[in-house]
Structures are given as C-alpha cells and as structure tokens.
Image (cartoon, rainbow, N blue to C red):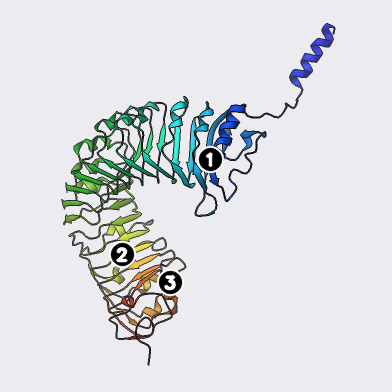
Amino acid sequence: MNLLATTLFIFLFTFTPHKATAATCLPDEEAGLLGFKSGIRSDPSGLLDNWIPGTDCCTWNGVECHFNSTRVQRLYLTGQPEGNPKAILSGTISPTLSKLRLLDGLYLFNLKNITGPFPTFLFQLPNIEFVYLENNKLSGRIPENIGKLTKLYALSLVGNRFTGTLPSSITELTQLTQLKLDNNSLSGTLPKAINKLVNLNYISLEGNQFEGTIPAFPANLRSLILSRNKFSGNIPASIATLAPNLTYLELGHNSLSGKIPDFLGKFKALDTLDLSWNRFSGTVPASFANLTKIFNLDLSNNLLVDPFPEMNVKGIESLDLSNNSFHLGKIPKWVLSSPIIFSLKLANCGIKMRIEDFRPSETFFYDFIDLSGNEISGNAISLVNSTQYLVGFWAARNNLRFDLGKLRFGERFRYLDLSHNAVFGKIPNSVVGLQKLNVSYNHLCGQIPKNTFPASAFVGNDCLCGSPLKPCK
C-alpha cells in the first residue's frame, strides 16, 4: 500500500463513524451477577428477567457500568411494595457479587424479603463507597470490623432486623457523610468517639433500643435523628456546637429529662425540633423567639409549664404542644398567621375560647387539627367545612354545640372525635367512610347509619338507636 493510500485509510478509519462489535461483560462479572440472581428464590414482578447469560450486562435492570466501559460500577435494585406489591425479591445476597471488583455502590431498596446477615463480601471490594440496604429482612450483628470499609461515604441499613451494639470501629469511617440505621433492633450505648466522623452531616438512629446519654457529635452535622430509643439524661452541652448548621434535631420518644437548654435558641437554621414524649420540665426558653426559620415544632407529652414564649416564625407547618401543663388561653397569633400550617395539635393546653374566634389566615392546607381536652365552645361547622384536605379533627372533651348533620367530610377525611361535647342532630350517612369515629356522650338522636364502628363510638347520647346499639323501635 503506497503512502497516499495508507494516509487515506488512516483518515477514513479515524474520522468515519463505525460500529463496534457488541460489548459484553467480563465473564467474571457476569458470573457474579448471575450468582446473585441464582440466590433469588422469588421475583414475581420480573425485576431480573433481562439478566440473560451472554447479553450485555450493562443493559440489565439495575446494573450500571462505568462510562464507556463494560465494567460494573453500581447495582441499584428497588422494589415498590406500595405502588406495585409484586415488585419485591425473596432470597439472599450472594457473595458472588465480590467478583464486581470495580463496584462502588450497592443499592437494594424496599425489596422486602432479602434475608441473611450483613454482606461481608463488601470487605473484598476495594472501591465500595455507597451501601444502601434499606427495608429488607437482613439480620444478625453489624460486623465488628465495619471500620475497615474506610472509603464509605454512606451506609444505610434502614428497616432491617439487625441486633447487637454499634461497633466502636464505626468511628474509623472518617469519610462517612451519611449514617442511617433506623428501624432495627440495635441496642447498647453509642461509641463515645462518634464525633471523630468529622465529615458526617446526617445521622439517623431512630426506632432502635439505644440507651445511655447522648454523646458529642461532629460540628458539621445537619440532621441528628435519635427518636424512639431509650436515651436518658439531659440534652448535653456538647449539642451547642451544632448550632451553625443543624436543621433537624429529633429526640422524641426517649427518656430524656431536665430543662430544655437555652442554647437551642441559637440554632437559627433549625427547621424541625422534636422533643416529644420525654420528661422535660420547667419552661420553654424565651430564646425560642430566635427560631425564626422553624417549620415543625413538637414539644408534646412532657412536663412543661407556663409561660410559653412568643415565637417570631414566618410560617409554621406543624405544631404540637399537647399534654403538658400549659394554660395558653387562646391559640397564639403566630399560629393563626401562618399561611402554610397543615398540622395543629393543642390537646389539653388550657385553651378557653369560642371556636368561632379561631380564624387562621389560611385553612385550605390543614390536614390535622387536635383541640381535645380544652374549654372551647361554639360551632365548629365553619372551621371544618372550610378545610379542603382535612384528614382528622379531634375536639373531644370541650363545650362544642352544633348540628352534626351539617358537617361536611372531604375526600381525605378519616378521623373524627367529638366525644363529650354538646353536639346534636342525626349522624349523617357520610360517617361510614371514616376509619375512626367517636361521637359518644353528646345529644345525638335517630337511627345510626350502617357501620362497622364499636358501640363505644355512640354510647351516652340522648336517643340513638340501631347497630351497634339497641334496635330502633
């Protein structure tokens, strides 16, 4: 071939589009993936149907390959048990996935019936950075040597059945930005050196059995979620170091006690504060007036007393002050002025007012209203009928007086408790669409519409009859 011809050939080969032969996986990586498939006993929705030997595994459902390569980078499989109940997998996580030497992420979400222990083959993967094994049925202990996965940026074992303590070696995962262990059965105290995780910005341990005092956490943290455990003692002073960045502080449903610390008023980035169902006592700090960005505040079911501070929030979304020893007198103005509030719970808050004087600037978005156990009088028809999205209205043990038949139930309405009031009239047929109903101890009369509620929902009225009470004469 002469020089001109050779030059022309090279030019055409270089600059003319040409189709490469179909790429396939490395045999070892294909074997690793097919080994995982063989560990699945049941796949009713066909999540793995296109995992066919000899085809390009980069096109298989849930498999992602490195750019311009046939090497597997991530395995991402998600079930949809709510939208599609069949989109689940039953089986185990095969250790053959250790053949995926360049795997940096393993994501198995909501597959529901994946069983077995923590997948120890992860220790054989030198590039693993993201492990999300959420809402399955994995069990056993978290390995003591978990700290060897030093490249991890995120570890999530949410919604499994892991037991035992949190290994102290987890504090060696210094690259970790997310640690999510919610809804398992983990117990014991947290490692004291957990503040060594200096890159951590999100930690959620909700729904376990952790106990002891709350340790110090790294200052970069944006979300600290420890609800539904057995933590005790005070909120420690070390929490004050989180003030510049923390947006979510959720400590509800523990056994914490003492006073709510004044330094919480310095958490000016705080979006959500949940201290509910503990044993906090004393007053709410006046410094809470500085929490201008807070959207969700739950202090319910503690031992808190008056006075409650005047808040300077621009718009609160949900507020629950129920079941303390407050005597609010009226619903606070900063609550009424919120244009975005959807949940208001002020049960047993010492409110004495006519419900007609409850005039929020916006009722359209309300989902939940709980005013139980106060001294509220008047007619609730206007309030309830002006809400488009109301799911539940609880106003038991007040002095409300109105015709129940004029109450309008929207499509989303599910819960109604008007027990121990002075409500009169007949029970409308629309109550049959509710999930829970209690209109006991009022002045209702007439035949009860056909329903599945217990007799306790209707007792103590003037002249109700029909199932589940006595037949009408």
Mark 3 or 1, nearer chain start: 1
Element carrying mark 2: strand
Mark 2 and mark 3: Cα distance apart in space = 16 Å
Instruction: Tell me the residue that label 1 is attached to.
Output: 39
Of residues 253 and 322, the one nearer the viewer is 253
Residue drawn where x is 32% and y is 51% of the image: 296
Relative to residue 368, is residue 396 drawn left or right? left
Q: Are the residues flagged by discs 1 and 2 in contact, CB closer than 8 Å?
A: no
- Residue 141, position in %: x, y? 35, 38
Q: Along the horizontal axis of the image, is 384 left or right of 215?
A: right
Mark 2 or 3 closer to N-term? 2
Task: Indicate the amino acid at tag 3.
Answer: Phe
* Residue placed under numbered mark 3 in the picture: 409
Q: Residue at x 77, y 22 (%)?
A: 16
Disc 3 from disc 1: Cα separation: 50 Å
Q: Are marks 2 and 3 in contact (CB under 8 Å)?
A: no
What amino acid is labelled 2 in the image? Asp
Label 2: which residue?
370
